[in-house]
Amino acid sequence: MRQAPLVAVWIGFLAAHAISTWLGWVWPNGPMGDTYLVYEPWSDRAIDGQGIVGISESWVYPPLALVPMVVAQALVWFSSYSLSWAVLVGLVDIVAFGILVGRGSSRGRLAGGWLWAGFVLVLGPVALFRLDAVTVPLAILALLLIGAHPRTAGALIACATWIKVWPAALAVSVVIASRQRWRVVRGGVAVSILVVTGVVLAGGSEHLLGFVTTQGERGLQIEAVAATPFLFGAGGGAIYYDTEILTYQVQGAGVDAVASVLTPVMALAVAAICALGVWRVRRGSPFLAVLPPLALALVVCLIVTNKVGSPQFQTWLIAPLVAWVVWDRARAWPLAALGLVTAGLTHIVYPLAYHLVLVGDTVGLGVLAARNALVVVLGIWAVVRLARPTSSPRRLSPIAHQE
């Protein structure tokens, strides 16, 4: 019977993946479309020698993002590339999940496993059928291995960041909060040197940071938090489809001004949160009282101040929340529950009610606005937790931290 909780969490995790994969085929608005419309053509071109995005041309993603897209091609003996992608994500998740829950001896680790499974189920297909899904297990492992294996943790964060940029928020959090910071940095620098060297030797030096400049040219996407007022008519706001970036954006009086200030606002907000984290560390706050709220606050900041509001951004919440639950589930569960609510609302917005949002339907826009508001609340809550002195958790999972 002692193995019953472990068996149950594994069943829940695998079932969540199976259900969300199935929903990718049956839900409207093609939630798995990015896989066969975008990832598959990019990887086909690379394999056929017709150009490597990020090397022969600037790309919206960092260079390592192409690796999982190509690896998924090895599984195309399944019925489709989309299914191959889901299997690839599932396999990576299974490895990370196995390390997370271990033998089931830690209640915190089991709770973290249930939270991860819940996120996959509640968020739905976009939890699996997007590039971000590959970075989630890497980020979770990195946070959990900081104490015992700091160089490995740094390497994992670097790999995830060179796939999608958001894990850089976790790297900054660790550098601020952990006494193992320089070992973590060395692991990350080693991976970064390998990536940069590989790109340069392949002749792609001029496109190495193309993902930074490409994002800077984007307008304000309809799901972005800052776009919410324009969806309800502010400035004569209206929705249009950008044929170059292939996404729905808003236009109207003041849209360009808002879009132009979001990046500096993001920089200032990140700097302020980091300063708060540094202050807490210098006041003697323990690692586990600083890192979880700091990491969550920075991740939410990247979502809230972003010109893009893609539904898969909600997967970024999984790593800091899972790690926090593992380390201190009593304090983390209220925030984790709110994170699940935002994931559920995101699932309603996309793919279920996306067509309603596009036509300006009040119900669709209301759900989207509620989701955006709750994400802001989650970020504020994390900042409050960071600013408020707390004692270190009494019980830690063995994998969590060994400073």
Image (cartoon, rainbow, N blue to C red):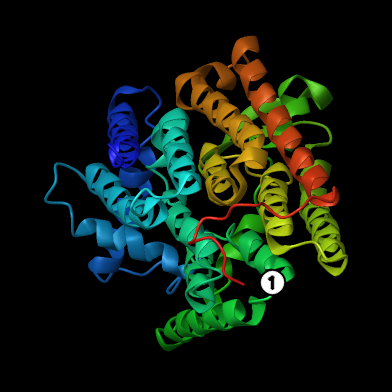
Q: Is residue 3 found left or right of 138 in the rendered image?
A: left
On-image quarter of the N terminus = top left
Front-most of residues 272 and 177:
177
Front-most of residues 180 and 378:
180
Q: Position of residue 67 (x, y in %)?
A: 35, 66
From where the camera sits, is residue 77 visible?
yes
Q: Amino acid at mark 1?
A: Val
On-image quarter of the C terminus = bottom right
Q: Position of residue 87 (x, y in %)?
A: 25, 47
Image point 58% across, 60% down: which residue?
167
Q: Which residue is mark 1?
A: 175
Front-most of residues 43 and 187:
187
Residue 239, placed above or below residue 4: above
Residue 200, placed above or below residue 35: below
Occupied quadrant, residue 65: bottom left
Q: Residues within 10 Å of mark 1 (few under 14, many from 20)?
A: some
Image point 55% across, 52% down: which residue?
323
Name the residue furthest left. Answer: 77
Label 1: state its secondary structure. Answer: helix
Q: How many marks?
A: 1
Q: Position of residue 141 (x, y in %)?
A: 46, 60
Q: Is residue 365 found left or right of 149 in the rendered image?
A: right
Q: Position of residue 393 (x, y in %)?
A: 67, 52
Image point 67% across, 40% down: which residue?
331
Residue 323, placed above or below residue 21: below
From where the camera sits, is residue 44 visible?
no
